[in-house]
Image (tube, rainbow, N blue to C red):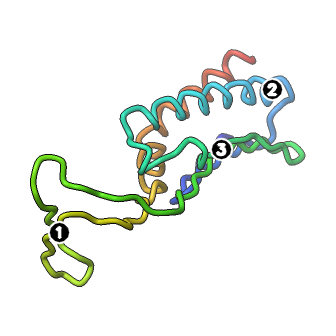
Amino acid sequence: MIQITIYADEVLFRLDQLPRRIRSALREKYGEIFERVNEELFRGVPGQYLDPNFIETGVTEQGSLLIGWIESSDKSGVYSIFPSKANFLRFVAKSGDLVFTKRVLRHPYLKGAPIVERYLRESKPWILDMLEDAVVEAL
C-alpha cells in the first residue's frame, strides 16, 4: 500500500509490506522524484521566498516500511524592499492602516512552507504515477 501525507512543511510517502526488490526500485524512484521537485520548485521562484538550502529530502527504512520525505524550513533573517517603478511603496499594514513609504528596510523573509505544500499537493498525482511505475517495473 502506498500512502502519501502532505503537511504544511513536509510530505511523507509511506509504503507498507513490500518485497525488497520493490523497496529498492522505489528508493531509486524517490531520488528521481526529489530531483524533479527541487528543479521545478525553484524554477522562477525568487530566493527571498525559497532557498534550496532550506529543503531536505531523504528515504528511511523502518523494518518493512519505506518512508520518503521532503521537509521545508523557513529562511530566517530580513531583506529590504525599495520601489522599482514608482517613488513610493503602498501596502496595508497588519493593523489595517494604509501605508506609504519610500522603503522597507527590515522585512522578514516570506514563509516558503505554503509554497512547498501547494506544489506538493498539485504534484501528488504525478508522484503517485512515478511510484506506481517503479512498482510495475520492479515486478
Report the front residue among 25 and 43: 43
Instruction: Determine the image quadrant of residue 33.
Output: top right
Give the secondary structure at mark 1.
strand
Q: Which residue is mark 3?
A: 13
Count of numbered circles in the view? 3
Instruction: Determine the image quadrant of residue 64.
Output: top right
Left or right placement of residue 41 versus residue 7 in this view: left
Q: Position of residue 134 (x, y in %)?
A: 66, 22
Report the front residue among 22 and 49: 49
Residue at the far left: name it: 86
Left or right placement of residue 18 versus residue 122 in this view: right
Left or right placement of residue 59 versus residue 111 in this view: right
Mark 2 residue crowding within 10 angstroms, few (<14) / some (14–19) / many (20+): some
In the rendered view of the protein, which quadrant contains the C terminus? top right
Going by the numbered disc 3, the residue's amino acid type is: Phe
Left or right placement of residue 80 versus residue 31 in this view: left
Give the secondary structure at mark 3.
strand
